[in-house]
Image (cartoon, rainbow, N blue to C red):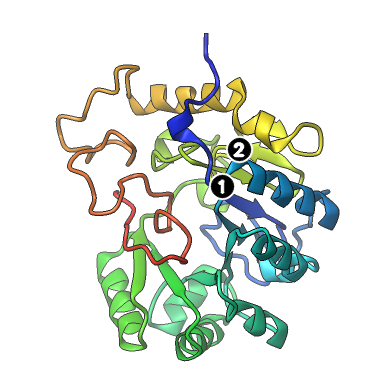
Amino acid sequence: MTTALPAERTTTYLWMDFTRKCQLECVQCYNSSGPDGDRGTMTRDDWFTVLDQAAKVGVENVTFIGGEPTMYPHAIEIADRALALGIRVEAYSNLVHLSDAWWTLLQREGMSLATSYYSDKAAEHNKITRRPSHARTRSNIVKAVERGVPIRVGIVGDNEQIIEAAKADLESIGVTQIGTDHIRQFGRASCGQTPDASNLCGGCGDGRASIDPTGTVSPCVFSTWKGVGNVREDSLASILSGPALSEAVDSFRKVWGWGKDKDKDKDGGQNKPCGPDCVPKNPCDPRCEPNAACYPGTPPSTCRPKN
């Protein structure tokens, strides 16, 4: 019988997934967001309640994500609430457009920024986003660096040459937190296939969880098909400590081939998702979520996903 999560897996990090609406329509978007996406059923007050409960259970960091989280009308108010509660906030934006109010917010202590960058060449980047977005995204990356906003950038793709060129471009404009990851086959990238847990990275539910625009909680933003509760119906604490989350994580581990005795991988973890049992250990922590450092950009992290 599966029991609640052990104390060492207390959730300290949440993705707050505000909306499926986005200016872009990226071919590899993990949740198929785009211009026709909606904002779900979570209200501003619902998100406030989530933050109040999150602070009480020990959540220290949240990432606003979507879709494009800066398009959510109450996002700045929600960030204010989080900061007042002592929770650090990262906004994962496509950086196509940020208002003056957002730039003011991002320069507050406890705020940071993240984005995706697909190529140093506009045509290649725009082919992924399906919009002429490269110039705006790059310009706002430069702006963030110039204004001293902590920013991390994820390069997602399967062409090593393109990835290295994009990384060099980012380094040339002063970005120091750069992560890389291969394309995860979820959402639009799955081409309609049933979600497959073998495409996950191995960090799902391990100190983290995601809440989508309907209030459904899942082990991470890539495993939203595995809902473990809804914050509009039950408290966040009861969901994060409840058996459904443990059962979901256990089901993933069966797919990954991790036994209950947490046997270490003989091949150094190269053929399994990156997780708590991978060896050798990364310098910071091997439990990296896809396309991200281990934790939000404040405080800085240099951890990389392990493919």
Going 65% across and 65% down the picture, which residue do you hit?
83
Task: Assign a secondary structure to mark 2.
Answer: strand
Q: Amino acid at mark 1?
A: Val
Left or right: 177 as drawn, with respect to 184: left
Left or right: 34 as drawn, with respect to 121: right
Q: Position of residue 242 (x, y in %)?
A: 62, 24
Determine whether label 2 and label 1 are within 8 Å by CB: yes
Q: Amino acid at mark 2?
A: Ser
Q: Nearer the viewer, residue 17 or 35?
A: 17
Going 32% across and 36% down the picture, which residue do you hit?
276
Going 22% across and 45% down the picture, which residue do you hit?
281
Going 20% across and 39% down the picture, which residue do you hit?
279
Instruction: Determine the residue located farthest toward the top in the rendered image.
Output: 1
Q: Position of residue 210 (x, y in %)?
A: 60, 45
For the residues labelled 2 and 1, the Cα–Cα distance comes to: 7 Å
The residue wearing badge 2 is: 218
Q: Nearer the viewer, residue 168 or 91?
A: 91
Q: Can residue 227 be seen from the camera position used here?
A: no
The residue wearing badge 1 is: 221
Circle 2: is it few (<14), some (14-19), or many (20+) Cα within 10 Å?
Answer: many
Left or right: 259 as drawn, with respect to 230: left
Residue 69 picture quarter: bottom right
Task: Assign a secondary structure to mark 1.
Answer: loop
